Amino acid sequence: MAQQALWSGRFAEGMAESTLEFTSSLDVDSALGFFDVMGSLAHVRMLKARGIIPPEDADAIIGGLKTIAAEMEAGEFELDFSEEDIHTNVEFRLTSLIGPAGGKLHTGRSRNDQVATDFRMYLRDAVLETVGAIDRLIDTLVKVAQDHGMTVMPGFTHMQHAQPVTVAQHYLAHAFKLARDAERFVDAYGRMNYCPLGAAALAGTTYPIDRQMTAEALAFAGPTENSMDSVSDRDFVSELAFCASQTAIHLSSMAEELVYWSSQEFGFVEMDDKYTTGSSIMPQKKNPDIAELVRGRTGTVIGALVNMLVMQKGLPLTYNRDLQEDKRPLMESLETLTQCLSIMSPVISTMTFNTERMRAAVEKGFINATDLADYLVVKGVPFREAHGIVGAAVRYCIDKDKRLEDLTVQEFRTFSELVDDDVYDYIDIDRCVERRNSIGGTSPVSTDAQIMSVIQGYMAREDFVRQETSLIEGAWDALLE
Ligand code: ARG
């Protein structure tokens, strides 16, 4: 039962099996394996360059680490669960490969700065992947907008018919939200992309290390500036958990909308068979389960944010073992989010818009009432007064079971003398849409401009993702050379 831990010198007895089981993080941090090896390669190359360890030992370590990287790549790296985490696993494997020289790798560093570095490297990849997934969904939404620049549907406030809008305007609203989500991830990436390695346990080290060199070798923007901050900071974790939560919230709104848009009552969209499920008892059912699960999994993502915030609350400086709990929730959150983003694209790109149903819905609910008021304003009536006149006309229409456009000029004139024949063009639904060409409005002129802006945004992010990816991959190639 006794374990021979790396630090066994201090102890008369090994730790109990249950201690190891309770404290182990290997099941989660094994996902950091590749980054751990890269971090170690950067570290040992620096130790060698600075003459901190003999070159022959450094070369042996580099050789051993490359072997481990190859084993991991081939899926042949065996995890030893009697070692509590991935860092000790790698170090043990190294020593078993090259002998006692492996013990020199841990000179001038600690697992505290090591794990903070590893996790940031892992998260850089995860963020780049998430940004890509968001942008692919945005691309899908843009295509919908391009196809439906003049597909009119009711715009809602308080879930009541408000004013006519287009499907393009509606989906661009979602696209802009997601674009900000992607930007938030990019911003968080910039704050996170500094290298804690060399902060050592908490206070830095007396060895003449070169932190600039290790930071560069690992494709970070630079070293972190305070050793105590470096090993205790997890605000990059909470920040990403928030970025994920906000994105999940946006997705869940879209999902909720698909649920009721595909209901019999709305019937605005019909989902493709491939992306729906049936009922085990009711043969007629076609259920929007994907949308419901996207909505439901928001809980996993927001849960991770709450978890991270509470886990960090009141922690004293610097490293405390509580911090080990940062990985599973955020990894799970980002993975869940990416899955949701990825499935929403085909759900939306394959569904059909029932444009006739949308048009029929627009005809109801006096959705052009604001336009009638605007018409009177153009004729010189103060807006507040026009609002009252139209309200009375709407009440009249409800009694007579008519739409505003069904009223004769004679009938209109019982509410305002100023109404003429031109009123019909003014309150025509299509014209209502086309005339809303203020910046950001629902007219096709405006939505075309919005589409351009959204596309520019994701092209810039695509460049960013491409550049960072090639920087990172270049760093790995150089380290493995
Ligand atoms: N498994 C640990 C973690 O994820 C690594 C750091 C352990 N450091 C320590 N002083 N016990 O946080």
Image: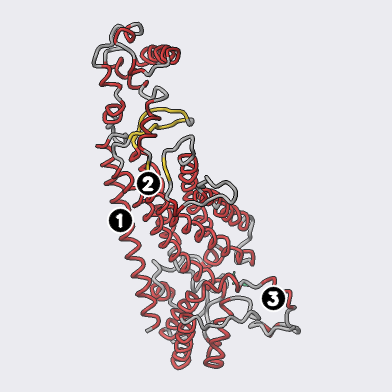
For marks 3 and 1, the one nearer the N-term is 3
Q: Give the Cα separation between the discs numbered 2 and 1.
A: 15 Å
Residue at (41%, 73%) from the top-left corner? Answer: 218
Q: Against 107, is 473 above or below?
A: above
For marks 2 and 1, the one nearer the N-term is 2
Reading the image, the residue beneath label 1 is 460
The answer to which of 240 and 53 lies nearer the viewer is 240
* Residue 175 numbered tag: 2
Q: Against 186, is 401 above or below?
A: above
Q: Is residue 419 left or right of residue 363?
A: left
Residue 412 visible somewhere in the drawing: yes
Q: Give the Cα separation between the discs numbered 3 and 1.
A: 47 Å
Instruction: Name the element at disc 3.
Output: helix
Residue 19 position in % (x across, y down): 72, 74
Reading the image, the residue beneath label 3 is 20
Instruction: Name the element at disc 2.
Output: helix
